Image: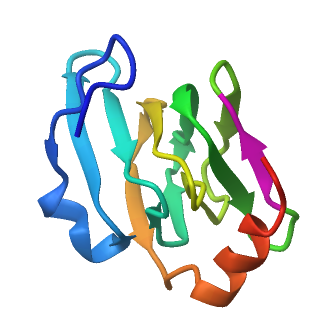
Amino acid sequence: MEEMSVFKTGEPNDAFKDYFVGQSYLNMLTTEQVKVANVTFEAGCRNNWHIHHADKGGGQILLVTAGKGWYQEYGKPARQLNPGDAVNIPAGVKHWHGAAAESAFQHLAIEVPGENTETEWCEKVTDEEYEKLNEVQI
């Protein structure tokens, strides 16, 4: 996949492929102090619903660097994402994010430090749910 921004796309995200529909790529920018990853989604790729748990602190911040995408919290309307957008995801919030159907998408994923952090991977975003979103022009 060609580079979309100043951050390199990285390698296929095979370690997490069971939690994605479509192909994603991962480039860990840093694992010291605060973990920051560049995550690239091919058009139509999205991750499963998931929750970042923590006893204290935790959560995730997404900084959109390229392409068009979606972010949705469980039970709420989806939010369109474009370069320059930021998403703050508190610990304990069930959500998903990924590319729009017609556009690759890239964001920096920043792991907010916390105590006893872990990610719980849940069900897939169904094709029907996803296709309804992509009927909207973004």
Q: Quadrant of the N terminus?
A: top left
Instruction: Residue 40: name its quadrant.
Output: top left
Q: Residue at x 68, y 34 (%)?
A: 87
Q: Residue at x 72, y 66 (%)?
A: 134
Residue 71 in percent (x, y) is at 68, 52
The foreground one among 123 and 6 is 6
Q: Residue at x 54, y 63 (%)?
A: 51
Name the outermost residue toward the top. 6
| Placement of 61 over or under 7, stated as above or below | below
Lateral position of residue 80 relative to residue 115, left or right: right
The stretch of residues the image draws in magenta is 78-82
The foreground one among 57 and 52 is 52
Determine if the magenta segment contains residue 81.
yes
| Placement of 9 over or under 52, stated as above or below | above
Residue 94 in percent (x, y) is at 64, 66
Residue 93 in percent (x, y) is at 67, 59
Task: Tell me the chief SS of the magenta region.
Answer: strand
Instruction: Residue 20: name its quadrant.
Output: bottom left
| Placement of 22 over or under 7, stated as above or below | below
| Placement of 6 over or under 102, stated as above or below | above
Determine if the magenta segment contains residue 99.
no
